[in-house]
Image (cartoon, grey):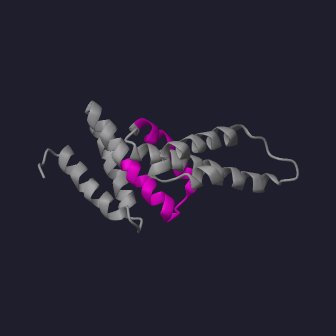
Amino acid sequence: MALATGSQGRKNAGQALNYSNKLVNVMKSKPKPDGVSQADWDRRKTVMLGRGYWIAGVISGEKEAWVDCDRNLRAAVPLIGKEPSMAGPAYFYLGLSNYKLGKMVGDKAKMLEGAKFSDQAVAIPGPYSQPAYRNSIAIKDDINGRKR
C-alpha cells in the first residue's frame, strides 16, 4: 500500500497502477495472519483493498481507460466510505466513465448513471465538486439533446 500511495502522481502513474493492482491481488487472497483478531484483519483488509481499488480507478480515469476506471471504483466505493478525499474523486470519475461508456454505445441509462455519480461528487466538498457540477449539467443537456 505504501508503494502504491507513494507512487501516485502523473509522473509515476504507471508504477502506482502496477502497485495498486498487486495490492488488490494480494489482499483478495491473503489469509489472516496468526495473532491478529478477525475484526482487526477485516478492518485492515478493507482499508488496503479500498485504497488499492481507488488508486487503480482514479489512475484509470485519468488515463481515460473507462472500463477499468468503472470496475475499480465500483469495487472501491463500498470500502472507502464517505471520506471526502477519496469519495469525491471516486464519484467524479465514476460519473465520467459511465457517461463516456454510455455515450460510446448510445446507452442513455448508463449516461444517466454518469449524471447520478456526478451529482454525488457535487455533494462532497472539495476540488471535484465544481467540475462534477459542470459535468452533470453537460451530461443532462446531452441526454436531452440540448446544445451548450
Which SS does the magenta portion mostly show? helix
Outermost front residue: 11
Q: Is residue 1 visible?
A: no
In the image, taking residue 51 as reference, residue 69 lies left or right, namely left
Q: Position of residue 67 (x, y in %)?
A: 42, 36
Q: Relative to residue 70, is residue 119 depicted above or below?
A: below
Q: Quadrant of residue 103?
A: top left
- Residue at 52 percent across and 50 percent down: it is 54
Disc tally is 0
In the image, taking residue 43 as reference, residue 60 lies left or right, namely left
Q: Relative to residue 77, is residue 108 depicted above or below?
A: above
Q: Is residue 89 magenta?
A: yes
- Residue at 13 percent across and 52 percent down: it is 148
Q: Quadrant of residue 69?
A: top left
- Residue at 52 percent across and 62 percent down: it is 82
Outermost left residue: 147
**Highlighted range, magenta:** 67-95
Q: Position of residue 83 (x, y in %)?
A: 53, 63
Q: Position of residue 48 (x, y in %)?
A: 65, 51
- Residue at 60 percent across and 43 percent down: it is 19
Q: Is residue 76 visible?
A: yes
Q: Position of residue 99 (x, y in %)?
A: 31, 43
Outermost top residue: 105
Q: Relative to residue 39, is residue 102 depicted above or below?
A: above
Outermost bottom residue: 125
Camera-side residue of 10 and 31 = 10
Q: Is residue 130 magenta?
A: no
In the image, taking residue 76 as reference, residue 38 lies left or right, namely right
